[in-house]
Amino acid sequence: MDVGETMELVRQAILLLLVVSLPVLLTALIVGLIVSVLQAATQVTDPTLSFVPKILAVLLALAITGPWMIEMIVDFGKQAFGN
């Protein structure tokens, strides 16, 4: 394996990292934004109110997209070790 192939493998790994983490990060971002708007509208500033919905939403997103994430990572591993 030369430098070009190694750099391509690293590029694919970084792209895979972004694609696999995107559903969970977007879920946390959207839920956090909704909770922040509700807190601003109701003037409730309890810090735990923002964490609990985000944790539950992230766990739900992981439960839904987890099998797809694992499949993508395993396929990449097979491809990387196959070369």
Image: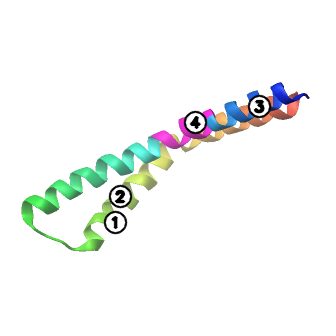
Span colored in magenta: 15-22
Which residue is disc 4 drawn over? 68
Mark 2 residue type: Lys
Pointers 2 and 3 in contact (C-beta within 8 Å): no
Q: Which residue is mark 2?
A: 54
In this view, the mark in front (4 or 2): 2
Of residue 63 and residue 54, the one placed in the foreground of this image is 54
> Which residue is drawn at the image coordinates 77% and 31% (left, top)?
7
In primary-sequence order, the first of circles 4 and 2 is 2
**Disc 2 to disc 3, how far (Cα)?**
36 Å
**Other-residue count near label 2 (Cα within 10 Å), few / some / many at <14 / 14–19 / ≥20:** some
Q: Splitting the image into 4 quarters, where does residue 52 fall?
A: bottom left
Residue 46 position within the rendered picture, expressed as x and y whole percent measured from the top left: 22, 74
Q: Is residue 13 magenta?
A: no
> Sequence-wise, which precedes: disc 4 or disc 3?
3
Element at badge 4?
A: helix
Which amino acid does the dot numbered 1 rest on? Phe
Real-space Cα distance between discs 3 and 1? 38 Å
Q: Mark 4 or mark 1, which is nearer to you?
A: 1
Alpha carbons under labels 4 and 2: distance apart: 21 Å
Could you tell me if the residues under marks 1 and 2 are in contact, i.e. CB atoms within 8 Å? yes
- In the image, which is nearer the foreground, mark 4 or mark 3? 3
Q: Earlier in the sequence, mark 4 or mark 1?
A: 1
Query: What label sits on residue 7 in the rendered view?
Result: 3
Please state which amino acid type lies under the numbered disc 3.
Met
- In this rendering, would 10 be left or right of 37? right
Closer to the chain start, of discs 2 and 3, is 3
Decide: few, some or many residues near mark 3? Use Cα within 10 Å; few <14, some 14-19, many ≥20.
Answer: few
